[in-house]
Amino acid sequence: MNNATHNQFLPLPSDAALQIGWPTLNHFLLDAPEKFFARTRVNADYGKPGWTRDCGKRFHRGCDIAPVKVTATGRTTRVIFTNCATNNDFESEEPTFVPHDDVFCVFDGRVVEVVDNENASDFGRHVVIEHSWPRGGGKFFTLYAHLSEISVTGSSVMSGQRIGKMGQTSRSADARNWMAIAPHLHFEVRDAEGRAYEPVEFLRRYVSLR
Ligand SMILES: [Zn+2]
């Protein structure tokens, strides 16, 4: 995949018939977005999609949904923050947390990828589900990453079905360290070619409020 498709979002198809559920019990996106996204003490935009990482130098294809059930470990870990105004790095000891939220499939579909090996990719333990747009019939995919546990094995899944538990898995030690201070579900939405839709627009437009 080339950089052009990595570093921008596809426009969402309009399909008024699509009604999705929330991927976790965190439903704060519309009313209190500051509680919806994972954030760090220095980067309030950490969990948002787009150019939100490394002072806007690294593109984030997904959105990182903060847990509503979380416990402090009582331990800290060392991270290197960047002051984006001065471009200076500084070290900090930050408190660490463990998330406990269940993760749910957002729409009826078919499990097409279950990666139980947490060291296989930067997504850690993750699940990909294939869906069809209700009107157009084209395929789209949702990805649920960094899970601690996967509870689906294959075949069909329903909207709202529990597919696992939020975790902090990744083959990247650096990513695991950031997730320790800002635990989250990394949620992505893709088309059939693997290009990403803006996941927050997707949730805002299609999530069912009933
Ligand atoms: Zn992410």
Image (tube, grey):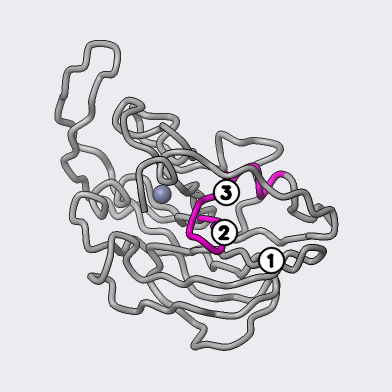
Let me know if residue 198 is in the magenta part: yes
Specify few, some or many for label 3: CA neighbours under 10 Å numbering under 14, 14-19, or 20 or more.
Answer: many
Q: Nearer the viewer, mark 2 or mark 3?
A: 2
Q: Which of marks 3 and 1 is in front?
A: 1
Closer-to-camera residue (131/70): 131
Residue range in magenta is 188-204
Q: Which residue, as the protein is rendered here, is positioned at the far top?
A: 86
Q: Is residue 169 left or right of residue 186?
A: left
For the residues bearing labels 2 and 3, Cβ distance under 8 angstroms: yes
Task: Give the residue number, with chain letter if any, for mark 1.
Answer: 138
Position of 141 relative to 117 (above/below): above
- Secondary structure state at the residue bearing disc 1: loop
Disc 1 marks which amino acid? Gly
The earlier-in-sequence mark between 1 and 2 is 1
Specify few, some or many for label 1: CA neighbours under 10 Å numbering under 14, 14-19, or 20 or more.
Answer: few
Rounded to the nearest angstrom, the CA distance separating label 2 from label 3 is 7 Å
Residue at the image position 54 percent from the left and 80 percent from the top: 111
Closer-to-camera residue (54/181): 54
The earlier-in-sequence mark between 2 and 3 is 2
Q: Is residue 4 left or right of residue 177?
A: right
Rounded to the nearest angstrom, the CA distance separating label 3 from label 1 is 14 Å
- Image quarter (top left, top right, bottom left or bottom right) of the N terminus: bottom left
- Secondary structure state at the residue bearing disc 2: strand
**How far from the left and from the top, in percent, is residue 95?**
28, 43
Task: Give the residue number, with chain letter if any, for mark 3.
Answer: 197
Task: Give the residue number, with chain letter if any, for mark 2.
Answer: 191
